[in-house]
């Protein structure tokens, strides 16, 4: 009954969104697609966030997106922070900040298009988001996970190649499952990754990853491929392209076999790739290029991780670092 009422309210609000507002949001999303070249996942996030915003404006009777007062945007942010989206669950500060960023960009777009002189969201205070550092795995954990892949059967050979490639090239999970056979050059020891915004980069592939992918291509992929198998590098048991969920499951299973109890995700291998490179003396700008980060500040967060690691090592190892030793 409650669910049905909620759905009815949802549909009612959606119908009431003014055509001018819907059209402006559609133009903005087209701009992000064509001019900014954002990934499909990022565009969907913008679409969801602006849908929340448009519903709120519809509830308050706003029909013209160029005539939104700053106080109303502030009220939207406050309501988003205070209202549970499910029983006992509220949006985190980072989620609210992300929605506000989308709204701010939308209104900035309207200013740049000459439809208004004021960005209604420019002065709205962003929620304070606690800084969370990436959680890399130790080198020992990565080694244990690789041992947890098993060996011999085609599935185990593929699993090792998947994990070696994730860690050896620092790929996003979407980049990994998007790889085709022709994207990998085992002779050169490199691969072509297509990242956010369809930006391509060439990433070196270390010896262990080259050996693992080579073994997979000769010993496993031929037996996994079927009549309808396309160019995908990594295949599932049905001969189709390995999915994000499938790759995550491979890593989860290997970590469990290795006796690692904490949650391990593909992105943690990317964090580990960056952290271990910096700990080994790599230049942060080189790591930025390898990761495919658009701005250096995104990569510099890993320098804080390595700094904390050095501090921990110092206090645990130096004979006069702590009192009472």
Image (tube, helix red, strand yellow):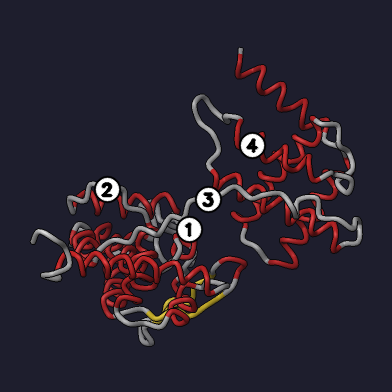
Q: Say whether residue 318 is left or right of residue 199.
A: left
Residue 184 on image: x %, y %: 42, 77
Q: Say whether residue 226 is left or right of residue 20.
A: left
Quick one: label 1, few (<14), some, or many (20+) residues within 10 Å? few
Residue 296 on image: x %, y %: 53, 74
As measured in the structure, the alpha-carbon distance from the residue carrying label 4 to the one carrying label 1 is 47 Å
As measured in the structure, the alpha-carbon distance from the residue carrying label 1 to the one carrying label 2 is 38 Å
Do labels 3 and 2 touch, CB within 8 Å? no
Ranked by sequence position, the earlier of labels 4 and 2 is 4
Residue that numbered label 1 is attached to: 228
Q: Is mark 3 on a helix, strand or loop?
A: loop
User: Which residue shows up at 38% across the image and 64% down it?
Assistant: 271
Ranked by sequence position, the earlier of labels 4 and 3 is 4
Residue 71 on image: x %, y %: 78, 41
In the image, which disc is placed on residue 129?
3
Do labels 4 and 1 touch, CB within 8 Å? no
**Which numbered mark, 1 or 3, is in the foreground of this view?**
3
User: Which residue shows up at 88% across the image and 49% down it?
Assistant: 66
Give the camera-side residue of 263 and 216.
Answer: 263
Residue that numbered label 4 is attached to: 80
Residue 39 on image: x %, y %: 61, 61
Q: What element carries label 2?
A: loop
As measured in the structure, the alpha-carbon distance from the residue carrying label 4 to the one carrying label 3 is 15 Å
């Amino acid at each position: 009954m409650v669910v049905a009422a909620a759905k009815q309210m949802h549909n009612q609000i959606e119908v009431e969104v003014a055509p001018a507002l819907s059209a402006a949001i559609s133009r903005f999303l087209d701009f992000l697609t064509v001019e900014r070249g954002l990934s499909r996942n990022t565009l969907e996030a913008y679409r969801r966030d602006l849908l929340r915003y448009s519903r709120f404006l519809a509830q308050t009777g706003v029909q013209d997106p160029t005539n939104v007062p700053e106080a109303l945007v502030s009220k939207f942010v406050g309501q988003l922070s205070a209202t549970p989206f499910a029983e006992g669950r509220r949006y985190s500060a980072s989620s609210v900040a992300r929605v506000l960023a989308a709204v701010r960009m939308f209104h900035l777009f309207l200013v740049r298009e000459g439809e208004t002189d004021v960005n209604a969201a420019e002065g709205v205070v962003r929620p304070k988001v606690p800084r969370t550092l990436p959680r890399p795995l130790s080198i020992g954990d990565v080694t244990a996970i690789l041992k947890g892949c098993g060996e011999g059967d085609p599935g185990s050979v593929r699993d090792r190649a998947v994990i070696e490639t994730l860690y050896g090239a620092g790929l996003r999970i979407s980049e990994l499952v998007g790889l085709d056979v022709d994207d990998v050059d085992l002779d050169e020891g490199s691969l072509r990754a297509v990242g956010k915004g369809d930006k391509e980069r060439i990433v070196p592939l270390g010896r262990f990853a080259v050996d693992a992918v080579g073994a997979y291509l000769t010993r496993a992929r031929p037996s996994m491929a079927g009549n309808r198998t396309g160019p995908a590098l990594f295949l599932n048991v049905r001969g189709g392209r390995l999915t994000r969920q499938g790759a995550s499951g491979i890593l989860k299973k290997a970590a469990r076999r290795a006796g690692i109890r904490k949650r391990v995700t593909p992105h943690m291998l990317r964090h580990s790739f960056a952290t271990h490179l910096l700990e080994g003396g790599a230049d942060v700008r080189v790591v930025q290029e390898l990761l495919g980060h658009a701005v250096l500040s995104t990569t510099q967060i890993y320098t804080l991780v390595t700094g904390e690691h050095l501090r921990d090592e110092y206090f645990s190892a130096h004979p006069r670092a702590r009192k009472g030793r």
